[in-house]
Amino acid sequence: MRLALLAWTLAGIWGCASAPPSPVPAPGPTAARPSPAPVATPAATPLVEAPRCPAVTVEVPEVPVGGEDAPVPPVLHDETLAPFFEKVARLLRGQATEHLRIAVYGDSNLTMDFLSGQLRRRLQARHGDAGHGFVALGQPWSHYKHMDVRHGVKSNITSYACSTHPILDHIYGISGIAGESQGLGGRAWVGTARGDAPIGKTASRFEVYYLEGKDRGQFAIEADGKELMRVESEAPELGVGVRRFELPDAPHEIAVVTTDGRRRVRFLGLTMERDVPPSFVVDAFGVGSMNTHAQHRQNAAINHEMLEERGYDLVIFATGANDGFSLDTTPKELGELIERQRKALPDVAILLLTPSDRGRDSTMKQTLDVVKQRYTIAEDNRVALWDLFEAMGGENSMGAFKRRGFAVSDHIHMNEQGGAYLGDRLLNALWTSLAKYLAAHPEAGCAPAPETAGQPGGGEKAAGLP
């Protein structure tokens, strides 16, 4: 984001006046001569700097507090989120030119998209339905399901995951899940939502991600049962292939179908968005049983390419539930994962969450250790931190969550109601920090006028603003 500085000129007006010399008085009495009128000196122009554009505010969504509802913890080190807050301010002013994209990495509590799905619903209900975002083209478990979208895998596709279903080369793409064809007719598909879904019922912009390389096969992209194009994934070098296309904004079902019975095709994911005024897109990357080590061993070069393509503005690590058994390696590996995001996305803001509580009667000791360690990792790597553990109620809170109907019987996983509860609290904490930032930076998000951008001395007014 480039902010044009307004140059303004201070004109000082200086003047002086002097009376002509008095004549030598003539002898004898003379009439009294009136004194010359005083000469007014113009006042200097006051040094008052007018704001480039009016201040902008944001409404912080309310959440219940009191009784069984713990106070919402603040986001710590939220000054590191300034690049994201500046972009949100541009969106609030109507100056954004593209959707803001949020990536949420998670473990099994994110494989049903409950927390991230609530975040998506809340943001798009307020700012506009921008489309669902990313869906993996593989399904390693029956419980890998995204909210407000339909998706699945049919015949001749093997699904891999970086945790429970690994592949030797560790190439899954940024979601940690991939699907690979095992013969002719391998098929994976994603469709817009139906029924009473509050968002996601139409889409118009699509991206198909796949692995390019030697001895890679051919596949077709279909839209609503009709073939759109054939794609050859063989290439001299290993890399990420992307096919983008647009359709009328309407309900759609997109499928990838292998047309090569000999060479394999690996599908890395599909995105569905809408060509509408800028809003928020939330990509959810939930992987069952994932820990930091499994995420870290993914192919960094392939993920770097995909991160550059998606261009995230905020990355959230909602992981840690399974890091209690690798506390010695987690700080180094998570720190390196954070740096990978920064290398691909130099302007990205990063938010680290503590894991949720787990345990039927009392919190597992390992969970307490991970919560404490997350604070240190956030500070050491200069990223923001939000304590989801405390947002639940802290130690021994999972039992209460289960009694309230927020969790399932294993006392580890949230149901949809529990995920929504925590998603609302996360947005409340984020937007509280955003409101604080906007109050401290009233010109946040001011955009330069195109004709004066980058020109010293140019002036501008944000389009659409008084």
Image (cartoon, helix red, strand yellow):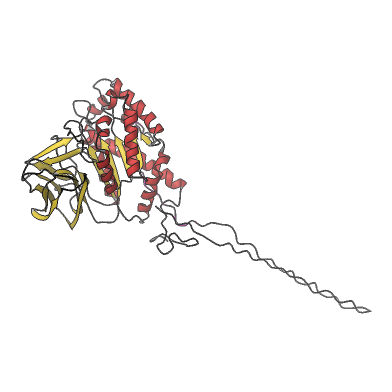
Name the image quarter holding residue 362.
top left
Name the one closer to the observer, 94 or 32. Answer: 94
Name the one closer to the observer, 238 or 58. Answer: 238
Q: Reply above or below: 28 against 462.
A: below
Q: Reply above or below: 230 against 22.
A: above
* Main secondary-structure element of the magenta-colored stretch: loop
Name the image quarter holding residue 278.
bottom left
Residue 281 as seen in the image, left or right of residue 85: left
Name the image quarter holding residue 119.
top left
Identify the image quadrant of the C terminus: bottom left
Query: Residue furthest toward the front?
Result: 236
For image coordinates 39% across by 29% down, the residue present is 376
Q: Position of residue 86 (x, y in %)?
A: 39, 49
Highlighted magenta segment, given as a residue range: 46-71
Residue 134 in the magenta stretch? The answer is: no
Q: Reply above or below: 463 against 366.
A: below
Residue 206 as seen in the image, left or right of residue 46: left
Q: Position of residue 360 (x, y in %)?
A: 23, 22
Residue 65 visible somewhere in the drawing: no
For image coordinates 16% across by 32% down, the residue present is 165
Query: Residue furthest toward the right?
Result: 28
Residue 48 in the magenta stretch? The answer is: yes
For image coordinates 35% across by 41% down, the residue present is 342
Q: Position of residue 87 (x, y in %)?
A: 37, 50
Residue 360 visible somewhere in the drawing: yes
The tally of labels here is 0
Name the one closer to the observer, 308 or 396. Answer: 308
Residue 164 as seen in the image, left or right of residue 356: left
Q: Position of residue 442 (x, y in %)?
A: 45, 50
